Image: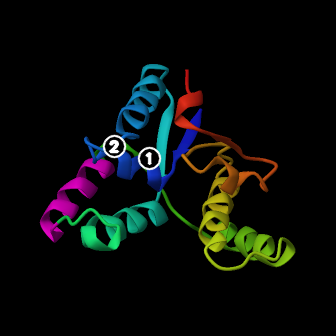
Amino acid sequence: MAILIDTNILLRVVQPTHPMHPVAVRALEILMSRGERLMIAVQSVAEFWNVATRPEANNGLGFTIEESRDEVKKLEGFFEILYENARSYGIWKELVLNQRVRGTKVHDTRLGAVMMANEIRQIVTFNVADFARFTSIVASHPDQIT
């Protein structure tokens, strides 16, 4: 089964001293051992880059461009990349209008639309509540992965 991995999981995996690091790594190890197709969206790569290159003083990781490039290369080698397409755009537009989505919720809606367009039903995220409005998507906290 294809499972989308949210940006917050990717960020915790590259932060060995973060309290959520062990849970994120363990969840990925379990999913890999089960033979799941682990995917990340292009949007998540951009979000990862945003946080990775942002200074630590501004809630970022403070990585250099080169460090960020190297981490993105690792992500590209480890995960399948899920691209947006005309179908996902149409689904996104319908969702934001019908659900009256505003502000930062637009980003989660975009991920949901990409998942729906590609028939992916599960996302692993630390922010399970952000995906509760999508009836066709199961959001799993990394602690729930067994």
Q: Residue 54, can we see it?
A: no
Q: Quadrant of residue 3?
A: top right
**Observer-nearest residue: 98 or 26?**
26
- Disc 2 element: helix
**Side (left or right) of 81 relative to 128:** left
* Residue 13: image tag: 2
Q: Quadrant of residue 46?
A: bottom left
As drawn, 126 above or below 26: below
Asked if labels 2 and 1 touch by Cβ distance under 8 angstroms, the answer is yes
**Side (left or right) of 135 relative to 76:** right
Residue lying furthest right? 98
Q: Residue at x 77, y 54 (%)?
A: 134
Could you tell me the amino acid type at mark 2?
A: Val
Q: Quadrant of residue 56?
A: bottom left
* Residue 9: image tag: 1
As drawn, 87 above or below 71: below
- Disc 1 element: helix
**Side (left or right) of 97 relative to 45:** right
**Observer-nearest residue: 53 or 33?**
53
Give the x, y percent position of residue 146: 55, 20
Give the x, y percent position of residue 17: 26, 42
Q: Is residue 68 highlighted in magenta?
A: yes
Q: Quadrant of the N terminus?
A: top right
* Residue 56: image tag: none
| Mark 1 surroundings: few (<14), some (14-19) or many (≥20) residues within 10 A | many
Secondary structure mostly seen in the magenta stretch: helix
Chain part drawn in magenta:
64-76
Figure label count: 2
Q: Residue 41, can we see it?
A: yes
Q: CA distance from mark 1 to mark 2?
A: 6 Å
Q: Residue at x 52, y 35 (%)?
A: 142
